[in-house]
Amino acid sequence: MENNLKYRDEVIFANETLPYQVMAISKRYAIVTRKIDKKEDEGLIRREVNNGDYDTFEEAFEANKNNTVYYLIDFVAETRAPNDRVFNPYNYDSLESINQCVTDLEAETVRLSERNSCKLEIKTIVPSGVLEKSSLNSSNVKKLFYFPLKRILEVAFKIGFYQYTNVPNEIWEQLCNAESIGSFIAKNLKGKFDTIKLK
């Protein structure tokens, strides 16, 4: 299957209803994630109860409601699956860990689980609409990503990767035209928008 996905695109698989977001991608592999859903992941949550980890379904969901559901995609084998490790070494909420997983997939030090794999059938691809700017006159900022539909700005600094939420389009335009990218971020973004360190 041809790899037509891009970073932050959303995909919906056949026989599923909720979108996963593309968090890392290479020529052969991709990693997609979404938050656990009470209805969509009922079987997964009930398994926690059946294993004796929780007494009730509600208790299991409350304990896991912020957890991430993920799939590794192999475009050559046309399959999707979790990784094949008994004890998962990756944090699929961390971009750094996700990118390490892709590196390990390429190096064949980790693989897709054969037992839990299924055929790769993508029903829908929703482009992220990402705006990217990489030719920056800045010693500290390497790349900028802006998602206008979600009003999310991601900044790849040399020392880390940060996400700012609810950023208006006009701020993005001003940032792209700023004389100093670093100074603009320090003055107009830091402390004014919710911030998450991704890497």
Image (tube, rainbow, N blue to C red):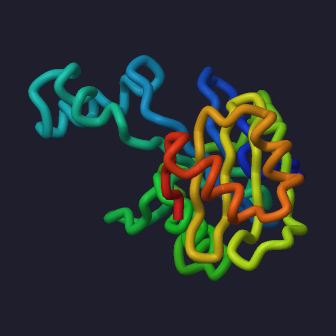
> Looking at the image, how many numbered discs can be counted on the residues?
0
Residue 133 pos. (x, y %): 86, 58
Q: Is residue 88 left or right of residue 191?
A: left
Residue beneath the point at 50% across and 41% down: 194
Q: Quadrant of residue 107?
A: bottom right
Q: Is residue 179 in view from this perspective?
A: yes
Q: Quadrant of residue 111?
A: bottom right
Residue beneath the point at 83% across and 56% down: 178
Q: Is residue 28 in view from this perspective?
A: no
Q: Which residue is more in the foreground, 161 or 88? A: 161
Residue 33 pos. (x, y %): 56, 44
Residue beneath the point at 13% across and 33% down: 54
Q: Is residue 176 left or right of residue 192?
A: right
Q: Is residue 40 left or right of residue 12?
A: left
Residue 137 pos. (x, y %): 85, 72
Residue 146 pos. (x, y %): 76, 45
Q: Which residue is more in the foreground, 185 or 75? A: 185
Residue beneath the point at 56% across and 48% down: 71
> 161 above or below 46?
below
